[in-house]
DNA sequence: ACCTGAACACCGTTCAAGT
DNA sequence: ACCTGAACACCGTTCAAGT
């Protein structure tokens, strides 16, 4: 066929198609991606270096599609709440993407910008030296875990028929699953902020 | 060839081989597994239902290979520290396994037992109703994130050349990478415990 | 510069055939 | 019951050939 007058593929369209596949099926593949755009599998490589770059494009897309408001760095608690919630909201919109991004090193400047804002808020709070990265790691772990939680179909711990009474009672008290995730996140956010405040005080 | 007098494969040997492959190469596959045991690929299915079951066997193996001491449920803070550390230590020994287990529902009774102990400690602390599951989720997110951190080769946020001064300074102050992970975990553990304590007080 | 089709080196799982 | 080899339906990536 040879080169067309106008390109049949754009990075934009590629990203959109991949995100739709992930939202629908929990993953994307080159064959499915090619079929969706109506193009041959190998031509994708004219626009993108491979699977990893598409994953980074997806990370960029979901973080930037709903920008968070400028944060007030004088109020570190409010700033952290905005930033952590922005991260989590991105995965609320696309829960099945979270597991695909865990192995991936973050290179996208806009996502790095979110971490820069985190660092600024933590310095404003009073953290110094290696505690800043430690606090970012803690927040990162929590946010990533919360995102992965959204991808899990139901409760993740499935106790056998016999035993485990306390866990089963706790799960029984957790309420409906839509509400559960939201409450667990709010609770966890309070725990993180309160724990950081206690660290500063102690 | 037909059936041998003694089975050539055992679930034990299968698990050991798979864990070695993950520790060395970050993943396992049926072809590599079969080659390592000296058996044909399809015969593995006589002992195991598929890939997912092997992953659950690996989770069981790493959690039980170094049992944690019985926890004193009257001291909830100490109990939580023991449990969260036990979880994390399992992945310190096998960091590359963490990313493979994130999509997997937990069914292993011994691992569920760890969550039962978590629930007991949290009730001893004074949490009730849906807060118990919320607290478990928070702890789970943190522990999982910390485990995934161990699998990451170096710092996960790789800022571009220009900009991001605060994040770069923070990373520069984080110290050597072996020490960094340990300090971040200790820091995060303090944050979680302190945050839970604040929740109970407030 | 951008597309195609064929090729390559991988996967997980199934199944008839053997003992 | 437990093994084998062949087959099937998938992957991601490369590359010569086209315009």
Image: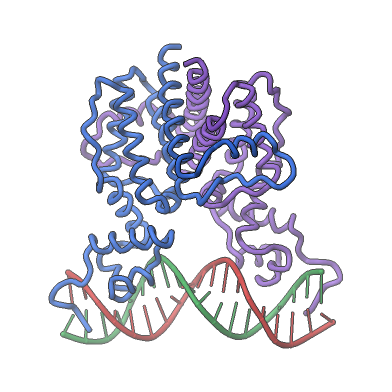
Chain colours: A blue, B purple, C red, D green
Q: Quadrant of residue B172?
A: top left
Q: Quadrant of residue A82?
A: top left
Mark count: 0
Q: Residue furthest left?
A: A5
- Above or below: residue A125 compared with residue A61: above
Q: Residue furthest top?
A: A202
- Above or below: residue C1 compared with residue B176: below
Q: Nearer the viewer, residue B89 or C15?
A: C15
- Identity of the residue drawn at 56% across and 50% down: B101
Q: How far across and down, in percent of the image, does residue B44 sit? A: 69, 67
Q: Is residue B176 left or right of residue B87?
A: left
Q: Nearer the viewer, residue A178 or A4?
A: A178
Q: Is residue B57 left or right of residue A188?
A: right
Q: Is residue A77 left or right of residue A192?
A: left
- Identity of the residue drawn at 24% across and 29% down: A71
- Identity of the residue drawn at 49% across and 32% down: B181
Q: How far across and down, in percent of the image, does residue A111 sit? A: 29, 42
- Above or below: residue A34 compared with residue A175: below
- Identity of the residue drawn at 52% across and 52% down: B103
Q: How far across and down, in percent of the image, does residue A72 sit? A: 23, 25
Quadrant containing the N terminus of chain B in the rendered view: bottom right
Q: How far across and down, in percent of the image, does residue A153 sit? A: 51, 51
């Amino acid at each position: 066929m040879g080169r067309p007058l106008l390109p049949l593929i754009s990075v934009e369209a590629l990203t959109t198609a991949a995100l739709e596949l992930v939202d629908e099926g929990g993953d994307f593949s080159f064959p499915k991606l090619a079929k969706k755009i109506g193009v041959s599998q190998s031509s994708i490589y004219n626009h993108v270096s491979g699977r990893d770059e598409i994953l980074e494009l997806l990370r960029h897309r979901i973080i930037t599609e709903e920008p968070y408001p400028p944060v007030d760095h004088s109020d570190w608690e409010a700033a952290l709440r905005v930033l952590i919630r922005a991260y989590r909201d991105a995965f609320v919109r696309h829960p099945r993407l979270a597991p695909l991004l865990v192995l991936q090193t973050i290179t996208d400047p806009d996502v790095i910008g979110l971490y820069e804002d985190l660092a600024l808020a933590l310095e404003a709070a009073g953290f110094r030296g290696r505690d800043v990265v430690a606090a970012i790691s803690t927040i990162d772990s929590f946010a990533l875990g919360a995102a992965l939680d959204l991808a899990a179909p139901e409760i993740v711990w499935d106790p056998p028929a016999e035993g485990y009474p306390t866990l089963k009672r706790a799960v029984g008290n957790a309420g409906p699953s839509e509400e559960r995730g939201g409450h667990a996140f709010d609770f966890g956010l309070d725990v993180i902020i309160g724990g950081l405040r206690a660290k500063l005080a102690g």
